[in-house]
Amino acid sequence: MDLRQAIRARHAVRSYSGRNVGEPEVQRLLEAAVRAPNARNEQPWSFVIVQNRDLLQRFSDQAKTLMMADSQVSSATRSLLRNPHFDVFYGAGTLIVICGKSDDEYATADCWLAAENLMLTACDLGLGTCPVSSSLSVLNLPRSKAELDMPLGVAAIAPIVVGYPDEPVARSTPRLAPKILSFKR
């Protein structure tokens, strides 16, 4: 798959088979992630990989509880969160959390650039991905960070689920044309 094909084919997958992603594939994803551009070549990222399904289920349940307590959550989202079968990780067996240095002003942007490299590489490998920002509130709790061996000064920034899609992967996701606010010459 060339880059243009990967960009067009990559989309958020929200249904995964039970098949786990192997360690060689995870390693390829991480190698792609660390090739991302980053401010001042600080390379602020580090990674947490979770393939423990019980832990993923517990984090999903906790994220749902925290979101339900948020007054800004829409009624449609609340309805989804009330469903006991809804999993914020969509049944994926692998969660890759891209973490960044808490004191680095550019870490968020840098980690999301790494996430894009990871997601495009996953697409090339026939894997599905989906950013799951709704899990950040749980992943950044002190008890979760301790359980995930995240040191002080590091925060979860870009949680991405990775797995084998439950359904055939679409080869193109419709997008609106670019909205150009200005083009000064």
Image (cartoon, rainbow, N blue to C red):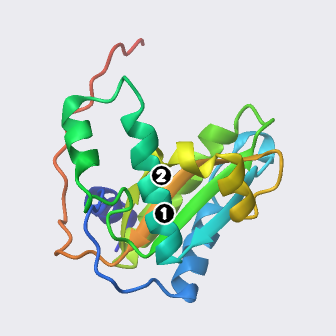
**Image quadrant where residue 2 sits:** bottom left
CA neighbours of label 1 inside 10 A, class few (<14), some (14 to 19), many (20+): few
Query: Residue, x 37% and y 37% (percent of image)?
Result: 68
Q: Which residue is label 1 attached to? A: 58
Q: Amino acid at mark 1?
A: Arg
Query: Residue, x 34% and y 64% (percent of image)?
Result: 6
Query: Residue, x 33% and y 14% (percent of image)?
Result: 181
Position of 7 relative to 19 (above/below): above
Callout 1 secondary element:
helix
Q: Position of residue 176 (x, y in %)?
A: 19, 35
Mark sitting on residue 62: 2
Q: Amino acid at mark 2?
A: Gln
Q: Is residue 61 left or right of residue 164?
A: right
Q: Position of residue 175 (x, y in %)?
A: 20, 42
- Pointer 1 and pointer 2: residues touching (CB < 8 Å)? yes
CA neighbours of label 2 inside 10 A, class few (<14), some (14 to 19), many (20+): some
Q: Is residue 139 visible?
A: yes
Position of 13 relative to 24 (above/below): above
Q: Is residue 165 left or right of residue 163?
A: left
Q: Relative to the observer, which residue lies in front, 64 or 174? A: 64
Q: Is residue 13 left or right of residue 97?
A: left
Q: Quadrant of the C terminus?
A: top left
Q: Is residue 176 visible?
A: no
Position of 38 relative to 32 (above/below): above
Q: Relative to the observer, which residue lies in front, 27 or 55? A: 55
Q: Position of residue 67 (x, y in %)?
A: 41, 38
Query: Residue, x 27% and y 61% (percent of image)?
Result: 14
Q: Position of residue 13 (x, y in %)?
A: 28, 62
Callout 2 secondary element:
helix
